């Protein structure tokens, strides 16, 4: 019951701010038609009509009753989001799980090999990735793999063809890798000094088994939160990367909605982004509690 009440409160607040921010954003559309010769009378018609209360109630009713809502171009908003969600989900899952796997694996591998040069190189690479804007990484990938080598397409989306996913996936996944690696490496070193690990060593457990099994299980409950937060962020759309690689996802739709001041589309996109974040954070806490209970009971 408590969780249900929290969800209802979240729903009310999220829908409120979705309507509020879109109304603020699209109050004045005059600059979109500055060079079109449109009359002042027609410009007045473009401005938001109706009160905030009526806009909010219409939006909530459309959410609850599944009433049809159209974009500025006449497309059904829900169908539009569903069409954009599948490519975004494909890209997000690829980026998050490939980046997370590599981050965890190399953090444990560096400790297992006890290689200072490898550890220093991976730390330097991670810091460089996080300090470099994602659009710069995207442009570099385009220059190398498309213009120079010509082995990958420059963008777009073609069903389940992995080639179209690699460049935007690497651009986004590299940041996931960097965050996960830096976190995992520090946690692995801390866990190795714990009495639990000393006990395992005293019982004759091999270093590889300790690191790749027991240490990983110890840090996994916190890792799952980081992974699902990254996933929720990417499922909400990566505007810059999707625009650079003209990827037909939620991020590109968000950019188009902001650019064209499409009120209905922006409202549903903002609500969708907040809802996805809420659901995945809720799931991450439940998974963390469940995993932690199984590990320590």
Image: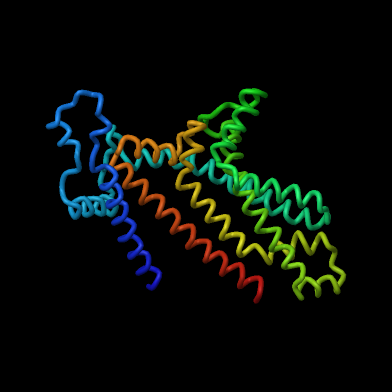
- Which of these two is toward me, 82 or 103? 103
Residue 11: x percent and y percent? Answer: 33, 60
Looking at the rendered image, the quarter that the N terminus falls into is: bottom left
Which quarter of the figure has residue 224?
bottom right
Residue shown at the point (72%, 62%) measured from the top left: 188
Residue 100: x percent and y percent? Answer: 63, 51
Q: How is the image coloured?
A: rainbow
Residue shown at the point (30%, 35%) measured from the top left: 75
Which quarter of the figure has residue 161?
top right
- Height in image: 129 above or below 201? above
- Height in image: 106 above or below 82? below
Residue 203: x percent and y percent? Answer: 85, 73
- Residue 231 as seen in the image, left or right of residue 207: left
Residue 73: x percent and y percent? Answer: 29, 32
- Residue 28 as seen in the image, left or right of residue 205: left
- Height in image: 72 above or below 196? above
Question: Which residue is farthest left?
Answer: 41
Residue shown at the point (29%, 56%) measured from the top left: 16
Residue shown at the point (54%, 37%) measured from the top left: 135
């Amino acid at each position: 019951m408590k969780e249900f009440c929290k969800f209802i409160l979240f729903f009310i607040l999220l829908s409120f701010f979705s309507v509020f921010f879109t109304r603020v954003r699209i109050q004045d559309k005059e600059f979109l038609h500055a060079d079109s010769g449109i009359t002042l009378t027609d410009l007045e018609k473009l401005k938001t009509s109706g009160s905030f209360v009526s806009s909010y109630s219409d939006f909530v009713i459309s959410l609850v009753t599944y009433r049809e809502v159209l974009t500025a171009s006449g497309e059904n908003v829900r169908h539009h989001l569903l069409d954009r969600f599948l490519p975004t989900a494909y890209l997000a899952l690829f980026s998050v799980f490939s980046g997370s796997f590599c981050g965890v694996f190399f953090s444990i591998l560096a400790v297992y090999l006890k290689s200072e040069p490898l550890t220093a190189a991976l730390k330097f690479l991670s810091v460089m990735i996080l300090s470099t804007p994602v659009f710069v990484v995207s442009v570099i990938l385009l220059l190398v793999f498309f213009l120079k080598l010509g082995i990958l397409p420059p963008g777009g989306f073609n069903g389940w063809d992995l080639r179209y996913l690699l460049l935007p996936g690497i651009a986004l996944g590299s940041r996931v890798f960097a965050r996960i690696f830096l976190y995992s490496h520090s946690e692995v070193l801390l866990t190795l000094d714990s009495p639990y690990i000393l006990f395992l060593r005293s019982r004759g457990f091999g270093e590889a088994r300790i690191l790749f099994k027991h240490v990983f299980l110890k840090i996994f409950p916190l890792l799952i939160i980081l992974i699902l937060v990254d996933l929720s962020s990417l499922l909400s759309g990566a505007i810059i990367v999707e625009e650079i690689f003209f990827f037909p996802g939620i991020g590109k739709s968000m950019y188009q909605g902001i650019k064209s001041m499409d009120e209905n589309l922006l409202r549903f996109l903002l609500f969708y982004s907040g809802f996805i974040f809420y659901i995945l954070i809720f799931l991450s806490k439940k998974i963390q509690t469940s995993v932690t209970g199984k590990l320590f009971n």
